[in-house]
Image: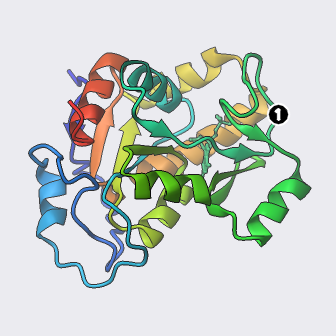
């Protein structure tokens, strides 16, 4: 039985770990490393694109896997964790609040942010744009706050290239069938968008070995606990 746990991702043939971006885990006070983080610890690191305190954690994984739920759970218990609010061109879902869940903008507004270099990373996902405002993240890192980005694979790769100190965590579903069920059950997207998201999910799942550690989302509580451990906050 798969339980919420760290998982090396072994068995997936693709291991496109980029050279030159390996670095120790993000937090100086992080707990005993898993096999994967231990491997990265041992790797030599020669060039760091951006020098920031090692407090940045990236949480990635396919749409519908439950990243937002895990982050909300984590922050309810640990409000000291700062979670970046992304900018997106998609419309707000019922209950989503501008400035809390996302900063909602139109394509022109998004393009301006890109042109002005105001995004740390950005991606096109299922027909919309998503990006992380750069300055708030840098401010929190300089202040030494535990900082969490919840972003897709394309964004995770950009952050890995720019900030190799960041700990990269992959949230995986217990099974493909469960991911389909969660995406469908959510009822927030029409069938064609669910199809787009499932197509993206296949690509994201294949990229799991790029990440420092994988948590399988069988239980929000367990994953949140594991994440806290990894962030050195438990
Ligand atoms: P949703 O539309 O379901 O809120 O998000 C779709 C996907 O975009 C999710 O995988 C989510 O993690 C990702 N995402 C949210 N914000 C950002 C961001 O700022 N940058 C990137 N690259 N992806 C994001």
| Residue 219 in sight in this render | no
Q: Is mark 1 on a helix, strand or loop?
A: loop
In the rendered image, the vertical position of residue 25 relative to residue 195, given as above or below:
below
The residue sitting at 24% across, 35% down in the picture is 233
The residue sitting at 77% across, 34% down in the picture is 192
Q: Name the residue under label 1.
A: 91
| Residue 170 position in % (x across, y down) | 37, 44
Q: In which quarter of the image is residue 142?
A: bottom left
Q: Residue furthest bottom?
A: 46
Looking at the rendering, the quadrant in which ligand 1 lies is top right
| Residue 212 in sight in this render | yes
The residue sitting at 23% across, 25% down in the picture is 2
In the rendered image, the vertical position of residue 1 relative to residue 101, given as above or below:
above
| Residue 222 position in % (x across, y down) | 27, 21
Q: How many marks?
A: 1
Considering the image in quadrants, where does the C terminus appear? Answer: top left
Q: Does the residue labelled 1 lie within 8 Å of ligand 1?
A: no
Q: Classify 10 Å Cα crowding around label 1: few (below 14), some (14-19), many (20 and above).
A: few
Q: Residue furthest front?
A: 143
| Residue 63 position in % (x across, y down) | 57, 36
In the rendered image, the vertical position of residue 6 relative to residue 140, given as above or below:
above
Considering the image in quadrants, where does the N terminus appear? Answer: top left
Q: Quadrant of residue 219?
A: top left
């Amino acid at each position: 039985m798969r339980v919420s746990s760290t998982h090396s991702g072994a068995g997936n043939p693709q291991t496109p770990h980029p050279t030159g971006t390996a670095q120790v885990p993000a937090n100086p006070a992080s707990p005993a490393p898993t096999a994967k983080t231990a491997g990265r610890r041992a790797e030599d690191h020669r060039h760091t694109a951006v020098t920031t305190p090692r407090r940045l954690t990236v949480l990635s994984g396919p749409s519908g896997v439950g990243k937002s739920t895990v982050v909300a759970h984590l922050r309810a218990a640990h409000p000291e964790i700062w979670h970046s609010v992304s900018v997106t061109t998609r419309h707000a879902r019922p209950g989503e609040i501008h400035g809390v869940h996302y900063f909602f903008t139109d394509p022109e507004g998004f393009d301006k942010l890109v042109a002005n270099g105001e995004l740390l990373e950005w991606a096109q996902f299922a027909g919309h744009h998503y990006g992380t405002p750069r300055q708030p993240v840098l401010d929190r890192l300089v202040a030494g706050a535990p900082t969490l980005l919840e972003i897709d694979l394309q964004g995770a790769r950009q952050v890995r290239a720019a900030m190799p100190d960041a700990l990269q965590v992959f949230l995986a579903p217990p099974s493909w069938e469960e991911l389909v069920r969660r995406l469908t059950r959510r009822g927030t997207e029409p069938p064609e968008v669910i199809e787009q998201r499932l197509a993206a999910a296949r690509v994201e799942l294949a990229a799991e070995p790029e990440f420092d550690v994988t948590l399988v989302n069988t239980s929000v509580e367990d994953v949140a606990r594991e994440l806290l451990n990894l962030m050195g906050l438990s």
